[in-house]
Amino acid sequence: MNLEQTRFNMVEQQIRTWDVLDPEVIKLLFELRREEFVPASYRTLAFVDMEIPLGHGEVMLAPKMEARILQELQVTKTDRILEIGSGSGYLTSLLAKKGGHVYSVEVLPELKIIAEQNLQAHGITNVTLEVGDASHGWPEHGPYDVIVLTGSTPVLPEEFQKSLVVGGRLFVVEGEAPAMNATLITCVKEGTYNRVGLFETCIHALRNAQKIKQFVF
């Protein structure tokens, strides 16, 4: 397999066609080798438009989703970032390359170890990896400039919005299969938030995500 040609095809055929045109994001996708964050048994599928199994019932987001998240959040070098779900550490690394410091919280200790190894192998040091259930929020290191949930949630807990600085951005996929919506939430002033619907999608749910309250009659 010609890895560089396959990487180029991924960017041209999947990433750009999904309205990811930010030159810094595109450049980073060429620099940070995605295949090195994919489990060995799936390495030949590293550039395919699909979610890749990581074991333990978890998956790695599709390449175009990772790229779109990065573009929508407009990460800058001074940003304090919260990532919910470390996975293999690839999106963590993309965020770290663009941002100031990433606090990434993974519910599964096994995946935290994998992410840690991948970050170390790529010399990425501006990340704090922690094990914990952050599906309802993680205010410990807040407030944050950027928050990204790497799994979907039927309802977004209020704690996430409350953890944003003024001007802070939050990416979330809300809803339940098969109808989910990716949303960008910006804190425009304390207690006031602007919501922009980005696109319809369907991704793996966060473990222990907040459920929609059922009314009992």
Image: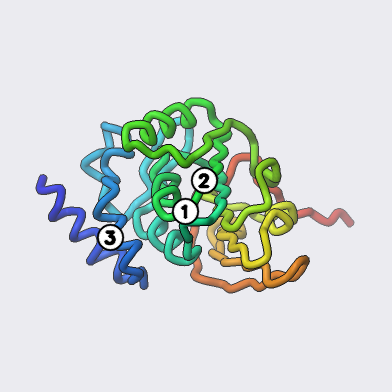
In which quadrant of the rendered image does the C terminus lie?
bottom right
At label 3, which amino acid type do we have? Lys
Q: Considering the numbered disc 2 on the image, is that residue within a helix, a strand or a loop?
A: strand
Quadrant location of the N terminus in the rendered image = top left
Instruction: Locate residue 190, reporting x and y percent.
Output: 76, 66
Q: Tell me how the rendering is colored.
A: rainbow
Contact check, label 2 and label 1, Cβ < 8 Å: yes
- Indicate the position of residue 74 as horizontal and vertical percent values: 47, 65
In percent of the image, x 28 and y 60: which residue is there? 27
Q: Name the residue at 73% across, 52% down.
A: 159
Whole-angstrom CA distance, mark 3 to mark 1, is: 15 Å
Q: Nearer the viewer, residue 13 or 34?
A: 34
- Left or right placement of residue 201 versus residue 14 in this view: right
- Residue reaching furthest front? 78
Task: Kindly identify the residue that appears in the image at 54 percent across and 49 percent down.
Answer: 151
Q: Give the x, y percent position of residue 184.
A: 57, 66
| Residue 19 position (above or below residue 48) | below
The mark that comes first in sequence, 3 or 1, is 3
Q: In this view of the protein, which residue sits in the foreground, 44 or 115?
A: 115
Mark positioned earlier in the residue sequence (2 or 3): 3
Q: Give residue 102's mark.
A: 2
According to the picture, the residue beneath numbered tag 3 turns out to be 27
Q: Residues within 10 Å of mark 2 (few under 14, many from 20)?
A: many
Instruction: Check disc 1 and report the residue beneath it.
Output: 99
Q: Residue furthest right?
A: 217
Disc 2 marks a residue whose amino acid type is: Val
User: Amino acid type of disc 1?
Assistant: Gly
* Front residue of 84 and 44: 84
